[in-house]
Amino acid sequence: MAPTMQQAQTTFTIPTRGLGLHEFTAHVARWVAASGIETGLLTLFCRHTSASLLVNENAAPAVQRDLLRWLDRAAPESAGYEHDDEGPDDMPAHIRTMLTGVSLAVPVADGRLALGTWQGLYLAEHRRAPHRRQVVAHLLGE
Amino acid sequence: MAPTMQQAQTTFTIPTRGLGLHEFTAHVARWVAASGIETGLLTLFCRHTSASLLVNENAAPAVQRDLLRWLDRAAPESAGYEHDDEGPDDMPAHIRTMLTGVSLAVPVADGRLALGTWQGLYLAEHRRAPHRRQVVAHLLGE
Amino acid sequence: MAPTMQQAQTTFTIPTRGLGLHEFTAHVARWVAASGIETGLLTLFCRHTSASLLVNENAAPAVQRDLLRWLDRAAPESAGYEHDDEGPDDMPAHIRTMLTGVSLAVPVADGRLALGTWQGLYLAEHRRAPHRRQVVAHLLGE
């Protein structure tokens, strides 16, 4: 008999230390492995407007610093924003979230995330202060 | 007996008044509620190359104006584009669509979109003229 | 009896000739048609950190050249990056990948991708040298 399509859902809470990229690939990989799903689709969703999700290079830390510098130059703190009630880092955080996005999908093959060799899953914190960020994960497959 | 995985699909038509962000969270939320699906995944897809989808802050209207100003500065109308047959606002619209994206996924939990407190779903119209934009919604779950 | 939800998965290998947009809509459309799935969801995932996925205009080639010029100006080769071990085009490639993204979802309706009239699926190669890029496709539906 063919296996039946099933789904699972959880929320990862990711504590951040302020501005920066926080890799959480291992957390997601463990949850996918524990589900027993062999073939399927993982979707991640970040429940914030000043933090976002990235897939990027997980080998050289300098890559991550350059990505952050680029975002800082593209949407700097002092750019005459109309919205600044919540501090100078708030509007840049919304812009950086818009550019990098809050949802992400990764297929699952042979019971594992089908990430490339150098790909890692990152939460990007765009505010200066530490936060506890929530990422909802949905997994579907058989 | 376990509920069976099911899916639903519809197309939302969103009339725009030209350049701007148009929130359509309530339309999607009503459709998800009517489906009866408790746990699942919603995917949205914008069928255009000069309009896109955003999740961003739904409280302060100044945030939305700052996001639009940023996109206007990043991909301005007068930037010596090769492609300008369809008017000066056409190529900037394609660039802004590339940066913000046309597909988006949001998990469904307890019969509702798992959006964060301040998150809203927006269609971004990048052309000056009003348009009728189509967003295809796919919902899967049980 | 209602049809049963099913899924399919494959990997497209896309040879690139260096910097540029490579349309692969027809390959995906054929695979979707062959699956027999009438209603569902296609997800694409690019397994690289210096190549990405785009949906954009498939009619005027000048649009694609303008998109590439914009990315080149936004993340140029000579911008004082900390990371440059792999050549001057490596860090710009990571930034352009971050901006355009590696995952993409398109609903399937009436057995076909629900793309708009002018939309095509593109792999964006952000390195100067030719590469063989892998895009994993996941299809779900009935």
Image (cartoon, coloured by chain):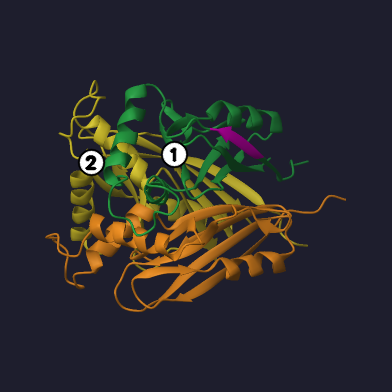
Chain colours: A yellow, B green, C orange
Query: In the visual, does C115 lie left or right of A99?
Result: right
In percent of width and height, residue A75 lies at 23, 41
Find disc 2 in the rendering and name its residue. A75
Above or below: residue C24 compared with residue B60? below
Which residue type carries mark 1? Leu
Query: In the visual, does C25 lie left or right of A51?
Result: right
Q: Chain of mark 1?
A: B
Query: In the visual, does C88 lie left or right of B45?
Result: left
Residue at 28% x, 47% y is B78
Above or below: residue B42 compared with residue C78? above
Viewport quadrant of the C terminus of chain A: bottom right
Check chain identity for marks 2 and 1: say if they share one: no
Q: Chain of mark 2?
A: A
Helix or strand or loop: what does disc 1 sit on?
strand
Q: Nearer the viewer, residue A16 or B85?
A: B85
Query: In the visual, does B107 lie left or right of A123?
Result: right
Can residue B25 be seen from the camera position used here? yes
Q: Nearer the viewer, residue A93 or A116?
A: A93
In percent of width and height, residue A81 lies at 22, 29
Q: Quick check: is C89 in the magenta stretch?
A: no
Residue at 28% x, 54% y is B80
For residue C142, which quarter of the picture? Answer: bottom right
In percent of width and height, residue B117 lies at 43, 25
